[in-house]
Image (cartoon, grey):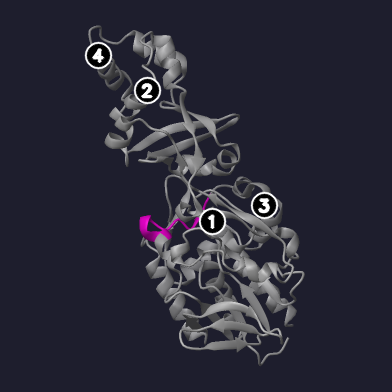
């Protein structure tokens, strides 16, 4: 590998920028190409509600969140663990803390301070970032080609890291348009699917008009043999939120399907039956549910959705523990937080180098993996960027 030629990183999201940091810290000349006018737009959007960097749960449990990609990602995550990511963030002057749920956040609770600190360090390490540079493939001499606002450009790098993202939130830059370029070079691809996405539900007008935008807190969501505790959000089109996202892969594959919502997972059906049996006589059903179980107007409305709830305590308790909600279909990629699909694992070797295109590595959401929200998305994106960068450094020795 020539020391004179730069290393090209295409895509200025978390995976690309951390790869540029690792490479430039080792003395390599790095050029980052980004087709958008500014960098890390999806990263900044993800940080608007509090930037969830990673999760503090035991590692064996952590890697299970990656489902079918667990075997592929485990060695990559072992080499750049949640603790390593926290140390890297702290090294940029951004303190972190662990929330009550075990999720890890920067104390600033935003992405912008972390991004500014990273860009300052990259500049100090000599990294050049070229925005409005859309990658268009390779020329006949195997040099990278780029379309610029008023011209074109080519580059013959020592190595390339492709970190162009998946296909969710296309307005922010990751639209999956790179798939044709790789398919033409014989790279195996898996079709994109929406992940961490809401689902359509045929709500009554009462639910749509009165309760859209309201949360269901401290619930349990069940689908077949799976159960997730957390929160969900009712929308005008259906339902979304953390509990839904945690099962999105399973639900996506099964739709149309029915989930069941337990409004009071901390109480057994017998406990609820007992409370209802001791309720004050003469109260309306809504008053009873509010006083004895603390149910919100939304929860009570869900009990009435499609059919009137039973009044007999045992039957009503059973409904409270398992309200059926029919999911019609997942929302599209343009409404998804992340995407499954992309470059198939068989198309890369253990260093994430493409088997059909030497010295070209894949990182981030371009790879075919998915995980729920909760820090797992950013952790794997950062870790694969580090993995690809370290592989390039080893190859240059």
Q: Which mark is residue 236?
A: none
Q: Quadrant of the N terminus?
A: bottom right
Magenta span contains residue 5: no
Give the percent coordinates (x, y) of residue 12: 51, 73
Question: Which residue is denoted by mark 3 in the rendering?
Answer: 69
- Per the rendered image, the range of residues in magenta is 46-56
Of marks 4 and 1, which one's residue comes earlier in the chain? 4
Q: Secondary structure at mark 1?
A: helix
Q: Residue at x 56, y 37 (%)?
A: 255
Q: Nearer the viewer, residue 279 or 354?
A: 354
Give the percent coordinates (x, y) of residue 235: 36, 41
Question: Which residue is denoted by mark 4 in the rendering?
Answer: 284
Q: Secondary structure at mark 3?
A: helix
Q: Which mark is residue 377?
A: 1
**Residue 135 occupies quadrant:** bottom right
* Mark 2 neighbour class, 10 Å CA radius: few under 14, some 14 to 19, many 20 or more: many
Q: Nearer the viewer, mark 2 or mark 3?
A: 2
**Cβ atoms under marks 1 and 3 closer than 8 Å:** no
**Cβ atoms under marks 3 and 4 closer than 8 Å:** no
Of marks 2 and 3, which one's residue comes earlier in the chain? 3
């Amino acid at each position: 590998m020539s020391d004179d030629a730069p290393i090209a990183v295409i895509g200025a999201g978390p995976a690309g920028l951390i790869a540029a940091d690792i490479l430039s810290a080792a003395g390599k000349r790095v050029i980052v190409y980004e087709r958008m006018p500014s960098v890390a737009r999806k990263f900044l959007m993800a940080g608007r509600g509090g930037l969830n960097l990673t999760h503090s749960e035991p590692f064996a449990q952590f890697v299970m969140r990656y489902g079918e990609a667990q075997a592929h990602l485990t060695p990559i995550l072992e080499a750049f663990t949640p603790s390593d990511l926290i140390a890297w963030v702290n090294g940029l002057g951004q303190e972190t803390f662990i929330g009550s749920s075990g999720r890890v956040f920067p104390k600033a609770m935003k992405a912008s301070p972390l991004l500014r600190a990273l860009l300052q360090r990259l500049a100090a390490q000599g990294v050049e970032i070229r925005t409005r540079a859309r990658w268009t493939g390779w020329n006949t001499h195997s040099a990278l080609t780029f379309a610029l606002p008023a011209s074109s450009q080519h580059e013959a790098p020592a190595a390339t890291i492709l970190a162009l993202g998946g296909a969710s939130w296309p307005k922010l830059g990751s639209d999956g348009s790179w798939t044709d370029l790789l398919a033409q070079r014989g790279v195996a691809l898996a079709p994109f699917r929406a992940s961490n996405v809401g689902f359509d539900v045929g709500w009554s007008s009462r639910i749509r008009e009165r309760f859209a935008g309201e949360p269901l807190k401290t619930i349990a969501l069940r689908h077949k043999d799976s159960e997730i505790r957390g929160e969900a959000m009712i929308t005008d089109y259906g339902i979304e939120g953390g509990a839904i996202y945690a099962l999105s892969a399973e639900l996506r594959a099964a739709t149309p399907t029915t989930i069941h919502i337990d409004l009071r997972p901390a109480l057994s059906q017998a406990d609820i039956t007992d409370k209802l049996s001791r309720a004050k006589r003469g109260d309306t059903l809504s008053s009873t549910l509010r006083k004895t179980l603390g149910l919100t107007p939304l929860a009570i409305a869900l009990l009435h959705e499609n059919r009137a709830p039973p009044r007999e305590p045992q039957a009503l308790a059973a409904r409270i523990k398992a309200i059926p909600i029919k999911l019609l279909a997942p929302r599209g990629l343009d409404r998804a937080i992340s995407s499954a699909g992309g470059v198939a694992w068989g198309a890369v070797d253990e260093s994430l180098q493409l088997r059909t295109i030497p010295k070209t590595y894949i990182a981030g959401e371009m790879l075919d993996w998915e995980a729920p929200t909760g820090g797992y998305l950013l952790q794997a994106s950062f870790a694969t960027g580090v993995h690809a960068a370290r592989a390039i450094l080893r190859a240059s020795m």
